[in-house]
Image: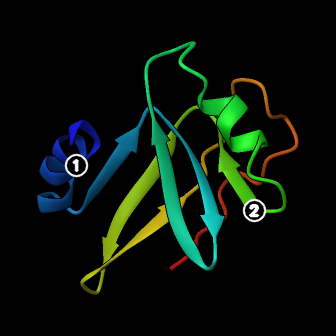
Amino acid sequence: MAARLAVEPSAHAGGGLFHAAGLIRDNRGELFIGKSGSGKSTLARACGDDEILSDELTAVRRDAGAFTVHGTPFMASLAWAAPIAPHG
């Protein structure tokens, strides 16, 4: 429920930045939102072959009525992640 509350205000404004690990799983964007040290990076690494966009700061945008997840150049520990990779 906390993640939903965090996303809704940004959704009305067209998107936002989230302190979250973001990845692509089964052609859908997923966010792992949490405080520093809560295990966002660890959880992202445990997702196997899913494409990790960011483990620190992930952007979500509303484009044509759908939400898209984007990586950012801000990484905590996953230097091999794919920053600035838009997905819809």
Crowd tier of the residue under label 2, counting other residues whose Cα lies within 10 Å: few below 14, some 14–19, many 20 or above: some
Label 1 Cα crowd, 10 Å radius (few <14 / some 14-19 / many 20+): few
* Lateral position of residue 73 relative to residue 17, left or right: right
Given residues 68 and 38, the one toward you in this image is: 38
Q: Is residue 76 above or below residue 28?
A: above
- Residue 52 is situated, as x and y percent measured from the top left of the image, at 72, 53
Give the residue pinned by disc 2.
50
Q: Position of residue 78 (x, y in %)?
A: 80, 34
- The image position of residue 64, as x and y in percent, is 28, 87
Q: Is residue 63 left or right of residue 2?
A: right
In the rendered image of this protein, does residue 70 appear above or below residue 55? below
* Labels 1 and 2: the sequence-earlier one: 1
Question: Which residue is depicted at the point 65% across and 44% down?
Answer: 54
Q: Nearer the viewer, residue 67 or 28?
A: 28
Residue 66 location (% of width, % of height): 32, 80
Residue closest to the far right: 80
- Residue at the spot 22% in from the left edge and 49% down from the top edge: 4
What's the residue type where badge 2 is placed?
A: Asp
- What residue is disc 1 on? 4
